[in-house]
Image (spheres, grey):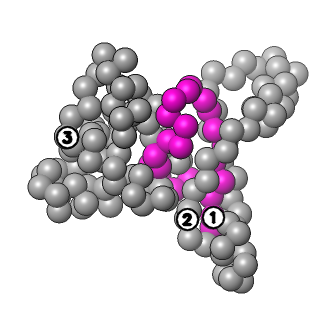
């Protein structure tokens, strides 16, 4: 949490109580969470029940590299490497929705090479792979 606060402050931003609690909620969950699920947890902690409360906090965390948006699940996950800028690949379990964050420079390089061969310059990409985590695969789910 101290690293997250320092990263925000280095960017000239403030880690407000609601932003801090939102990050704590994501870190506690060990999975991607939808904005309304985060909002319910925030409301239970006395931060209000209005959707903008959660959306603004989540947007702040994503903007400052402290969380990621997982498009397939329309959800958010805490960044596991907030100390450096990166563009991870997300490994999403189709059974339990657990999300693993993996640095994948070779995948990104291959994608950039394939795009360049078509005369296309990638400006932003999200790599998400769907499958099963080891726990679900081992349980035969």
Q: Which residue is mark 3?
A: 17
Query: Closer to the N terminus: mark 1 or mark 3?
Result: 3
**Residue drawn at (21%, 43%), measured in percent from left and top?**
18
Label 3 residue SS: helix
User: Which x, y percent locates residue 17?
Assistant: 19, 40
User: Which x, y percent locates residue 67?
Assistant: 45, 40
Q: Is residue 115 visible?
A: no
Q: Which residue is mark 2?
A: 97
Q: Residues within 10 Å of mark 1 (few under 14, many from 20)?
A: some
Relative depth, front residue between 78 and 69: 78
Q: Is residue 83 visible?
A: yes
- Residue 84 covered by magenta stretch: yes
User: Which x, y percent locates residue 38?
Assistant: 31, 55
Q: Are marks 1 and 2 in contact (CB under 8 Å)?
A: yes
Instruction: Choose top left, top right, bottom left or bottom right for residue 36.
Output: bottom left
Q: Can you name the residue that lies furthest to the front here?
A: 2
Q: Give, as a single range, the part of the protein colored magenta.
A: 72-94
Q: Residues within 10 Å of mark 2 (few under 14, many from 20)?
A: some
Query: Closer to the N terminus: mark 2 or mark 3?
Result: 3
| Separation (CA) of disc 1 from disc 2 | 5 Å
- Residue 100 covered by magenta stretch: no
Instruction: Choose top left, top right, bottom left or bottom right for residue 43.
Output: bottom left
**Residue drawn at (67%, 66%), measured in percent from left and top?**
133
Q: Which residue is mark 1?
A: 93
């Amino acid at each position: 949490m101290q690293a997250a606060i320092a990263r925000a402050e280095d960017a000239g931003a403030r880690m407000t109580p609601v932003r801090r609690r939102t990050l704590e909620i994501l870190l506690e969950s060990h999975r991607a969470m939808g904005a309304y699920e985060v909002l319910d947890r925030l409301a239970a902690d006395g931060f209000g029940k209005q959707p903008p409360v959660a959306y603004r906090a989540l947007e702040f965390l994503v903007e400052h590299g402290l969380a990621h948006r997982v498009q397939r699940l329309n959800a958010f996950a805490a960044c596991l490497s907030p100390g450096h800028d990166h563009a991870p690949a997300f490994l999403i379990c189709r059974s339990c929705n657990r999300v693993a964050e993996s640095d994948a420079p070779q995948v990104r390089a291959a994608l950039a090479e394939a795009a360049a061969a078509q005369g296309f310059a990638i400006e932003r990409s999200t790599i998400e792979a769907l499958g099963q985590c080891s726990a679900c695969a081992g349980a035969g789910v």
